[in-house]
Image: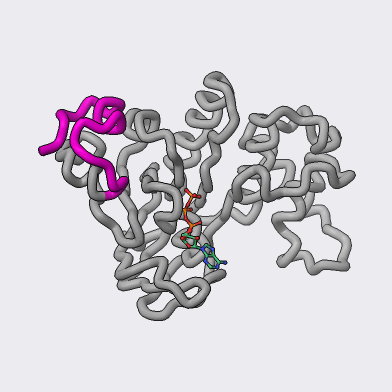
């Protein structure tokens, strides 16, 4: 099966320092994978490398198209745009910066809004939306190009449980048609909802089904914590040696 995203031997430096080392990662349509690691592990950099936004020192990235959902605070919400205009901005490279969108572009934006259950709010200014609704606008904006892989950068930050559950259901649905790779700090939720966990700390430390990653040592190595850490307790793993 052709991978939606394949990274082979990827090394990348930022500001003259190595950030990613020998990354081998392949995700396919139908997979909902979580990318887990501590602050500074390189999760965002890995996603940016997948998008071709970070120069590689070594290795290759192969994808037929990746959609990126940035962290919510990185988007300008006080800009006077409606929900449908914000989604349309995901097509700006296809439309051209100073050209008028055509009917097919609007249709793609409305289809994407339908997919995230926000069709009713399409004329609403984005600044008036709740955090959960904003997150769904960003997902629609990434889906508008129908990418084979959807990259989600910490989509749950600052959201309440019902909003997180709505989004999780949405992501699971999207992952039946595409590949979804989600960076998150919510380890327990990821272990519960994702098919696959990729543990990253500058390189891939472990990668597999949640049930298979039951060795406390790999979690201690990824998160640089000692035996008896709360992190192990939260994952219902035995204290490490
Ligand atoms: N533009 C940059 N120039 C130099 N170093 C950078 C740059 N962007 C990120 N870094 C460094 O690269 C490392 C990885 O950062 P990255 O944001 O990818 O980690 P992360 O796993 O997404 O972290 P977090 O969980 O905090 O979002 C960090 O040490 C960070 O300081």
Place residue 94 in its image quadrant: bottom right
Task: Give the x, y percent position of residue 167.
Answer: 54, 31
Q: Residue furthest left?
A: 241
Task: Give the x, y percent position of residue 150.
Answer: 51, 51
Q: Residue at x 39, y 42 (%)?
A: 32
- Region rendered in magenta: 222-241
Q: Main secondary structure of the magenta part?
A: loop
Q: Is residue 190 magenta?
A: no
In the image, residue 236 above or below residue 209: above
- Quadrant where the image shows the C terminus: top left
Q: Is residue 39 visible?
A: yes
Q: Residue at x 50, y 51 (%)?
A: 151
Q: Residue furthest bottom?
A: 57
Q: Is residue 107 visible?
A: no
- Quadrant where the image shows the N terminus: bottom left
Place residue 204 in its image quadrant: bottom left
Instruction: Classify residue 18 as left or right of residue 221.
Output: right
In the image, residue 162 above or below residue 118: above
Q: How is the image coloured?
A: one colour
Q: Is residue 237 magenta?
A: yes
Task: Give the x, y percent position of residue 240.
Answer: 14, 36
Q: Residue at x 79, y 68 (%)?
A: 96
Instruction: Classify residue 197 as left or right of residue 73.
Output: left
Instruction: Classify residue 66 as left or right of residue 62.
Output: right
């Amino acid at each position: 099966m052709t991978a939606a995203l394949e990274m082979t031997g990827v090394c990348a430096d930022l500001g003259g320092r190595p950030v990613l080392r020998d990354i081998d990662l392949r995700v396919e349509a139908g997979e909902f994978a979580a990318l887990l690691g501590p602050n500074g592990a390189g999760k965002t950099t890995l996603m940016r490398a997948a998008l071709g936004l970070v120069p590689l020192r070594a290795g290759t990235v192969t994808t037929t198209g990746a959609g990126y959902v940035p962290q919510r605070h990185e988007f300008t919400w006080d800009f006077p745009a409606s929900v449908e205009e914000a989604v349309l901005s995901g097509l700006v490279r296809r439309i051209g910066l100073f050209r008028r969108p055509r009917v097919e572009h609007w249709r793609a934006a409305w289809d994407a809004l339908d997919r995230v259950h926000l069709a009713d709010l399409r004329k609403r200014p984005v600044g008036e939306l709740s955090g959960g609704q904003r997150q769904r606008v960003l997902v629609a904006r990434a889906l508008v190009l129908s990418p084979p892989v959807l990259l989600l950068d910490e989509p749950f930050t600052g959201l309440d449980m019902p909003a997180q559950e709505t989004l999780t259901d949405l992501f699971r649905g999207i992952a039946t048609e595409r590949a979804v790779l989600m960076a998150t700090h919510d380890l327990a939720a990821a272990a519960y909802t994702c098919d696959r966990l990729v543990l990253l700390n500058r390189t891939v430390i472990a990668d597999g089904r949640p049930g298979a990653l039951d060795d406390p040592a790999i979690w201690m190595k990824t998160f640089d914590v000692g035996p008896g850490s709360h992190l192990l307790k939260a994952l219902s793993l035995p204290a490490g040696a």
